[in-house]
Image: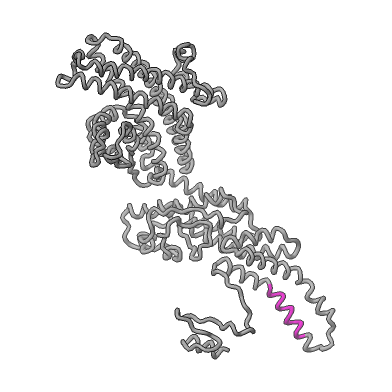
């Protein structure tokens, strides 16, 4: 058989070892005396378990050898002597056999072997439990070795994909996973912004999810921040890379390595000690990252985001809205919206450094064939701001975070645009107030006044009660913490609070607000069209009295204004009652704040003319 095997290795097959086209050999199925061993995936955990089981069974092997010698020297050795000698090893062998069977049945791989082993050990007693604890300690040593490289150097040494952490993309090169130390070549090949994720199906149940998330954060932070710092610093030689190794952990690397080694030497796996060590490393990493982001000017960057995304610099959008409007009305496919944004910023003397951080674009290009009457409003909602965060703030202001900012930006811009259009109508009406004294004019003035009053109060609530208040709280949170993850949570809570107080997540209130804004834009479009017809061929600043020939247009628009007036009153009443019901059932403070702003003079709560527009329950 050995001769046949050697011949097969040399490339000469035979009856026992059959050659295949891919230069492999298989054992002939006709041979019945070979044991049909099961196939297992390769892995460090499986190899460690096999070595530990072999070591554990060594006592049994030694006992069997001794019995063989005794049988050879004493042919009349009774069977009871054999049973008495082997009986102490029976419980352990049965437990090990059960363990192996469970692993085979569950096809456990990697860290899931720890899952099966830990449960099996916990259910054992006496001597068997002591032995299984040593086996578990051996297998856990693989986990601690992987965590040492990941927690201290950001290296994912997982060639067989056994750990509960993995790169979400397939671009992470195997060279990085297999190398034992930092190298320039591996670092250059690795993506500078890898996305690491938890594989929950590979997470043992005795390791809490919160601890696993901390482990993920530590390694990813080192991987991204330290390596990108090396790129920023222009490191080009291996010696310099080695000198920068451990930049985030600084002088505490040896201390943390000793802590992890101590965990591996413990006779039992203690989740309390394990969690404490992970938290110690996390706290150190988080403090260092806090210093990095604060040194990069986090507070100033948050202020820039508020100024642009949250319309803190109102004069910017006062200039931008009229310049962008013609392009969105005509659905210009090649319009340079970012150029218009940059130009508007320079006109209001916005800092050049701030302008360079933002780019304005249209998410979807609208074709002429798809234009409808509502197309301009859809175009406005398609505007998107992109923020180019500098290192190391790019991990704080990710694309997902920017999506949340853009959702808030779209809503705030819609409110600001409605307010702007009503203000422009007021200017036009003031210039022609002595030329128009008809009933239609009075209705237009009254409706515009009601719309302006409501939208101004909503705008005041958004800017003062929501944005300024929440921004102040965010700055206060940033000032009183020295922990990077606390910063992340504070910023996340800021976005969540702003979205909630803008009612973006409340379908009822959001629909009411959107309907109100839609009516305002429709009203402005009608009057703008009417004024443009009146001023055709004349000075737009001084609108003349309507000629007799345009009377049908006025009558037609008057009917539209009357319909809009009723629709607006009904929509405003609906908003008021929806907010009142929310305050009654939920009792949120910001709901009461908005009600106070829009109903400060008790117009909606006491005016009987408004109460007749109270919507039915199915309308709400």
User: Compared with residue 112, is residue 508 higher up or lower down, i.e. above or below?
Assistant: above
What residue sits 34% from the left and 15% below the top? Answer: 449
Q: Does the stretch in magenta take in 67? A: yes
Q: Is residue 250 visible?
A: no
What residue sits 34% from the left and 41% below the top? Answer: 387
What residue sits 31% from the left and 55% below the top? Answer: 234
Query: Residue 270's image quarter?
Result: bottom right
Q: Nearer the viewer, residue 93 or 412?
A: 412
Q: Nearer the viewer, residue 107 or 354?
A: 107
Q: Nearer the viewer, residue 93 or 340?
A: 340
What residue sits 38% from the left and 59% below the top? Answer: 190
Estimate the x, y position of residue 292 in percent, counting from the top left: 40, 45
Give the prevailing secondary structure in the magenta stretch.
Answer: helix
In the figure, is residue 617 to the left or right of 349?
right
User: Compared with residue 507, is residue 145 higher up or lower down, i.e. above or below?
Assistant: below
Q: Nearer the viewer, residue 530 or 329?
A: 530
Magenta-tinted stretch? 57-69
Estimate the x, y position of residue 399 in percent, counting from the top left: 39, 44
Q: Quadrant of the N terminus?
A: bottom right
Estimate the x, y position of residue 252 in percent, counting from the top left: 49, 53
């Amino acid at each position: 058989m050995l001769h046949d095997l050697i011949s097969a290795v040399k490339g000469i097959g035979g009856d026992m070892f059959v050659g295949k086209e891919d230069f492999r050999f298989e054992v002939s199925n006709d041979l019945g005396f070979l044991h049909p061993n099961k196939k297992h995936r390769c892995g460090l955990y499986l190899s460690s378990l096999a070595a530990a089981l072999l070591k554990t069974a060594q006592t049994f092997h030694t006992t069997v050898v001794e019995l063989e010698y005794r049988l050879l020297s004493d042919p009349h050795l009774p069977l009871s002597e054999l049973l008495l000698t082997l009986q102490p090893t029976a419980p352990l062998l049965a437990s090990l056999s059960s363990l192996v069977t469970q692993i085979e049945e569950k096809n456990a791989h990697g860290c899931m072997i720890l899952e099966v082993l830990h449960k099996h050990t916990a259910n054992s007693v006496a001597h068997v439990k002591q032995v299984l604890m040593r086996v578990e300690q051996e297998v856990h040593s693989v986990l601690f070795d992987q965590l040492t490289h990941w927690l201290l150097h950001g290296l994912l040494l997982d060639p067989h994909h056994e750990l509960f952490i993995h790169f979400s993309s397939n671009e992470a090169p195997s060279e990085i996973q297999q190398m034992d130390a930092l190298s320039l070549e591996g670092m250059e090949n690795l993506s500078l912004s890898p996305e690491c994720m938890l594989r929950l199906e590979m997470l043992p149940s005795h390791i809490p999810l919160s601890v696993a998330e901390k482990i993920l954060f530590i390694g990813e932070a080192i991987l991204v921040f330290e390596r990108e710092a090396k790129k920023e610093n222009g490191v080009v030689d291996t010696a310099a890379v080695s000198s920068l190794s451990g930049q985030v952990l600084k002088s505490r690397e040896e201390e943390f390595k000793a802590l992890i080694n101590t965990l591996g030497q413990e006779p039992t796996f203690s989740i309390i000690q394990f969690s404490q060590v992970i938290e110690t490393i996390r706290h150190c990493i988080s403090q260092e990252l806090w210093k990095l982001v604060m040194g990069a000017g986090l507070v100033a960057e948050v202020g820039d985001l508020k100024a642009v995304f949250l319309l803190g610099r109102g004069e910017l959008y006062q200039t931008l809205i009229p310049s962008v409007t013609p392009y969105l009305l005509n659905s210009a496919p090649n319009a340079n919206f970012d150029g218009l944004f940059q130009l508007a910023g320079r006109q209001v003397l916005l800092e050049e450094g701030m302008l360079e951080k933002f780019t304005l674009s249209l998410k979807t290009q609208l074709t002429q064939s798809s234009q409808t009457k509502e197309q301009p409003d859809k175009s406005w909602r398609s505007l998107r701001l992109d923020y180019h965060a500098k290192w190391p703030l790019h991990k704080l202001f990710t694309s997902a975070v920017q999506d949340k900012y853009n959702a808030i930006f779209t809503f705030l811009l819609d409110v600001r645009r409605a307010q702007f259009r009503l203000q422009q109508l007021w200017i036009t009406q003031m210039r022609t107030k002595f030329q128009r004294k008809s009933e239609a004019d009075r209705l237009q003035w009254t409706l515009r006044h009601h719309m302006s009053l409501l939208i101004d109060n909503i705008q005041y609530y958004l800017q003062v009660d929501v944005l300024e208040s929440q921004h102040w709280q965010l700055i206060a949170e940033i000032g009183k913490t020295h922990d990077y993850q606390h910063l992340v949570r504070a910023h996340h809570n800021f976005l969540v609070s702003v979205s909630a107080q803008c009612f973006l997540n409340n379908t009822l209130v959001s629909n009411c607000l959107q309907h109100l804004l839609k009516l305002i834009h429709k009203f402005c479009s009608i009057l703008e069209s009417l004024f443009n017809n009146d001023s055709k061929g004349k000075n737009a600043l001084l609108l003349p009295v309507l000629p007799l020939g345009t009377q049908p247009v006025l009558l037609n628009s008057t009917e539209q204004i009357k319909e809009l007036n009723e629709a607006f009153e009904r929509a405003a009443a609906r908003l008021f009652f929806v907010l009142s019901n929310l305050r009654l059932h939920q009792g949120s403070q910001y709901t009461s704040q908005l009600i106070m702003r829009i109903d400060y003079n008790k117009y909606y709560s006491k005016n009987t003319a408004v109460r007749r527009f109270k919507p039915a329950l199915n309308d709400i």
